Image: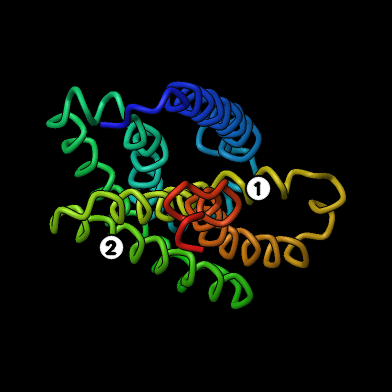
């Protein structure tokens, strides 16, 4: 157990940053539900007409993605993991199930219903989502907790592409461009979903102060 007096301050800062991020993501999700997903109840929407032929496949994809989107933040709760490990594991299995349903459905839907320009980035996104989640599961099965958390960060960052793409695409200048802006946005979000978690994980090692042991070894 760490005994340094600086530990509580670091943990408090981490707590504040993490929860502020989830508040922003929660507000973004509510915006996306209102702005992009109203076609589920508004059957006069052009989106409803577009998705109607694949509505049942979309249902499975949407339910799985919703489970992953809303349960994912709970997997990063240190308090839940330390005090209620069984609940943490149950939530993790539900998250895994959500990804296992939603990602293959995304591949199937895009292959039968989307234009070619959207098919490639969507397949890459769904495949990387499955891969990161599978590796997180394998790591925890082997007892490799730090690696498990790292891959879960990448998995959930990929989950959030659903929100990020729609928020960015709601910017009027980008929305007017249609697929000309949507496809690059998806590609950029795919790259950032892997780069940003890695940067967060490595930031203290790269830019943090050297410990006494590191200074003596230099």
Specify whether 120 is left or right of 188. Answer: left
Marks 2 and 1, Cα distance to the nearest angstrom?
A: 38 Å
Q: Position of residue 215 (x, y in %)?
A: 51, 54
Q: Nearer the viewer, mark 2 or mark 1?
A: 2
* Residue 32 position by quadrant: top right
Residue in the foreground of this view, choosing between 195 and 23 = 195
Q: Position of residue 177 (x, y in %)?
A: 82, 60
Q: Residue 46 — which label? A: 1
Residue in the foreground of this view, choosing between 65 and 187 = 187
Dot 2 falls on a residue whose secondary structure is helix
Q: Is residue 42 visible?
A: no
The residue identified by callout 2 is 135
Q: Is residue 32 visible?
A: yes
Label 2 Cα neighbours within 10 Å, binned few <14 / some 14-19 / many ≥20 = some
Taking the view exactly as shown, the residue that stands out farthest to the right is: 173
Q: Position of residue 86 (x, y in %)?
A: 12, 31
Q: Earlier in the sequence, mark 2 or mark 1?
A: 1
Dot 1 falls on a residue whose secondary structure is helix
Specify whether 190 is left or right of 64. Answer: right
Q: Residue 108 — which label? A: none
Residue in the foreground of this view, choosing between 122 and 142 = 142
Taking the view exactly as shown, the residue that stands out farthest to the front is: 216
Looking at the rendered image, the quarter that the N terminus falls into is top left
């Amino acid at each position: 157990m760490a005994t340094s007096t600086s530990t509580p301050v670091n943990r408090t800062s981490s707590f504040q940053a993490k929860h502020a991020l989830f508040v922003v993501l929660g507000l973004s999700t509510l915006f996306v539900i209102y702005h992009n997903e109203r076609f589920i109840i508004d059957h006069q929407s052009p989106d409803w007409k577009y998705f109607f032929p694949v509505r049942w496949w979309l249902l499975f994809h949407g339910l799985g993605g919703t489970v992953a989107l809303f349960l994912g933040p709970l997997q990063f709760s240190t308090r839940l993991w330390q005090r209620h490990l069984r609940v943490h594991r149950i939530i993790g299995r539900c998250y895994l199930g959500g990804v296992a349903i939603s990602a293959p459905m995304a591949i199937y839907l895009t292959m039968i219903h989307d234009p070619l320009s959207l098919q490639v980035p969507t397949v890459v996104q769904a495949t990387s989502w499955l891969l990161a989640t599978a590796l997180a599961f394998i790591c925890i099965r082997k007892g490799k907790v730090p690696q498990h958390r790292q891959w879960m960060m990448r998995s959930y960052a990929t989950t959030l592409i659903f929100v990020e793409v729609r928020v960015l695409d709601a910017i009027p200048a980008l929305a007017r461009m249609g697929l000309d802006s949507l496809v690059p946005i998806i590609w950029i979000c795919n790259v950032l979903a892997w780069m940003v978690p890695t940067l967060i994980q490595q930031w203290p090692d790269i830019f943090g102060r050297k410990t006494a042991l590191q200074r003596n070894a230099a």
